[in-house]
Image (spheres, rainbow, N blue to C red):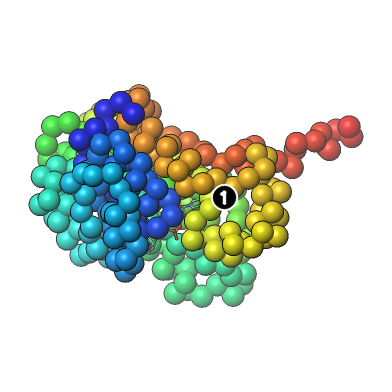
């Protein structure tokens, strides 16, 4: 992708799943990657071990904790001197009927999925504004930015909130060389979906709802991050690009059932 070689990238939650695939993709593009992890050091080491060579580093931080995030940025800038791209990827979910949803679980999901991107974006923007050249932020949202997800109330709220984080920061900094966009994946084969990815029957049930008939592999999502971070997306800001196999196309309307055909 044009303009990515030698860029310095920080990816949150890069010890598994989509974050790991994004790290590998940016390393293949010739970037130096700061691989953030919260507690899964082994996972982060496996991201590093399979990445194309580069000046990659591991950085521990819980993205929901302000002191962790400021320390992480200090470590990244000490190692790289300059950061070009922030990928807000870390995210969690936990199912619960909304009437049983505990306030602590609700808060934790908002802290990781929404406070984390705020804290990391703020630090990145402070750095981008401190030197010439601007910068890029790409958030990992979800189709649940626009599709409600019953029993995942706090997750849905965070992804809806990420849309406004993306659009507001994009507008606020458009004139200062900073682009802010998001990727909206559908169902992707990663550990967040352990409930169904290893069970062929459950996987088939999930895939029966997807117009393209299959879940995505993480590389297909990582490619969209690479595009939005690259110069090929130089005129795009404030947008969410859905990579969802058609899930946002109202699949129930595949047949014209509402018109009696
Ligand atoms: P995953 O569970 O493999 O990845 C989540 C990552 O976030 C893990 O590496 C985890 O350690 C990290 N993390 C969790 N809490 C953290 C914290 N406090 N600080 C730092 N890191 C933390 O699952 P994934 O599917 O790769 O999820 C990545 C992102 O993709 C999430 O934001 C998720 O909402 C989004 N997403 C996933 C799917 C899907 O179907 N897999 C679909 C849409 C969106």
| Residue that label 1 marks | 187
| Above or below 87: residue 179 | above
Residue at 51% from the left image edge and 38% from the top image edge: 242
Quadrant in which the N terminus appears: top left
Residue at 53% from the left image edge and 50% from the top image edge: 188
Q: Position of residue 73 (x, y in %)?
A: 18, 54
Q: Which image quadrant is residue 203 in?
A: bottom right
| Above or below 84: residue 189 | below
Determine whether, in the image, residue 187 is placed left or right of residue 7.
right
Determine whether, in the image, residue 67 is placed left or right of residue 131.
right
Q: Which image quadrant is residue 109 in?
A: bottom left
> Which secondary structure, mark 1?
loop
Q: Position of residue 220 (x, y in %)?
A: 48, 40
Tag 1: Cα neighbours inside 10 Å, few (<14), some, or many (≥20)? Answer: many
Seen from this angle, which residue lies furthest right? 260
Q: Between residues 82 and 157, which one lies in front from this camera angle?
A: 82
**Dot 1 beta carbon under 8 Å from ligand 1:** yes
Q: Quadrant of ligand 1?
A: bottom left
| Above or below 53: residue 107 | below
Residue at 40% from the left image edge and 58% from the top image edge: 16
Q: Is residue 172 visible?
A: no
Determine whether, in the image, residue 166 is placed left or right of residue 95.
left
Quadrant in which the C terminus appears: top right
Q: Position of residue 113 (x, y in %)?
A: 41, 58
Q: Between residues 181 and 214, which one lies in front from this camera angle?
A: 214
Residue at 47% from the left image edge and 72% from the top image edge: 105
């Amino acid at each position: 992708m044009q303009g990515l070689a030698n860029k310095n990238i920080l990816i949150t939650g890069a010890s598994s799943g989509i974050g790991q695939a994004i790290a590998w993709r940016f390393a293949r593009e010739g970037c130096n990657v700061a691989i953030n992890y919260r507690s899964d050091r082994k996972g982060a080491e496996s991201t590093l071990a399979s990445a194309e060579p580069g000046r990659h580093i591991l950085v521990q931080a819980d993205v929901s904790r302000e002191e962790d995030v400021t320390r992480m940025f200090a470590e990244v800038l000490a190692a790289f001197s300059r950061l070009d791209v922030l990928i807000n990827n870390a995210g969690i979910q936990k199912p619960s009927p909304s009437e049983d949803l505990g306030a602590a679980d609700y808060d934790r999901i908002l802290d990781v999925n929404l406070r984390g991107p705020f804290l990391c974006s703020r630090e990145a923007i402070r750095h981008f504004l401190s030197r010439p050249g601007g910068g890029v932020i790409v958030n990992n949202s979800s189709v649940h930015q626009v599709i409600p997800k019953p029993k995942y109330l706090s997750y849905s709220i965070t992804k809806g909130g990420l849309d406004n984080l993306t659009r507001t920061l994009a507008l606020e900094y458009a004139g200062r060389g900073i682009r802010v966009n998001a990727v909206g994946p559908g169902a992707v084969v990663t550990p967040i979906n352990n409930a169904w990815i290893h069970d062929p029957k459950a996987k088939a049930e999930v895939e029966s709802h997807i117009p393209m008939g299959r879940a995505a592999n993480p590389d297909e999502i990582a490619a969209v991050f690479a595009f939005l971070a690259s110069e090929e997306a130089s005129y795009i800001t404030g947008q969410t690009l859905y990579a969802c196999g058609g899930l946002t196309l109202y699949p129930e309307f595949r047949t014209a059932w509402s018109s009696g055909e």
